Image (spheres, helix red, strand yellow):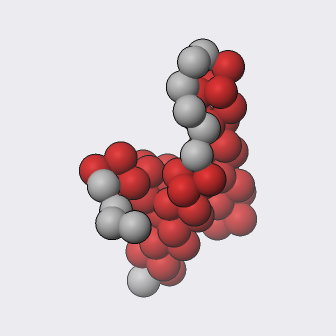
Amino acid sequence: MKPDRNDLLHVETCALIVVAVAALLPMWVACIVALLAGIGKELYDREHGGVPSWGDIICDCAGVALGALLTII
């Protein structure tokens, strides 16, 4: 499966959330906040006629890992 623009937006958004929150709070809190944002978005999709996707959750996890890496460096 080829990544599309939506997948990249999930990665970018979660990475940015981790970097921003980690500037104020511990890294583990930043990672949890980003994951909860991604899961919340999928729950919102489910309740409002969208299609929740496990692929989006995987992209969110990749974004969290990227954000944590960028913060550590």
Question: Considering depth in this image, is 46 or 34 the residue closer to the camera?
Answer: 46
Question: Considering depth in this image, is 71 or 32 the residue closer to the camera?
Answer: 32
Extreme residue in the bottom direction: 73
Q: Is residue 26 visible?
A: no
Left or right: where 11 falls relative to 61 = left
Left or right: where 36 falls relative to 55 = right
Residue 70 place in picture, x, y as percent = 42, 74
Extreme residue in the top direction: 48
Quarter of the image where the N terminus is located: bottom left
Q: Is the residue 22 above or below the residue 33 in the image?
A: below
Q: Residue at x 28, y 50 (%)?
A: 5
Residue 19 place in picture, x, y as percent = 47, 59
Q: Residue at x 44, y 51 (%)?
A: 10
Q: Residue at x 46, y 72 (%)?
A: 66
**Total count of labels:** 0
Left or right: where 31 falls relative to 21 = right
Q: Residue at x 54, y 56 (%)?
A: 55
Extreme residue in the front direction: 1
Residue 37 place in picture, x, y as percent = 61, 41
Q: Is residue 52 visible?
A: yes
Residue 44 place in picture, x, y as percent = 63, 25
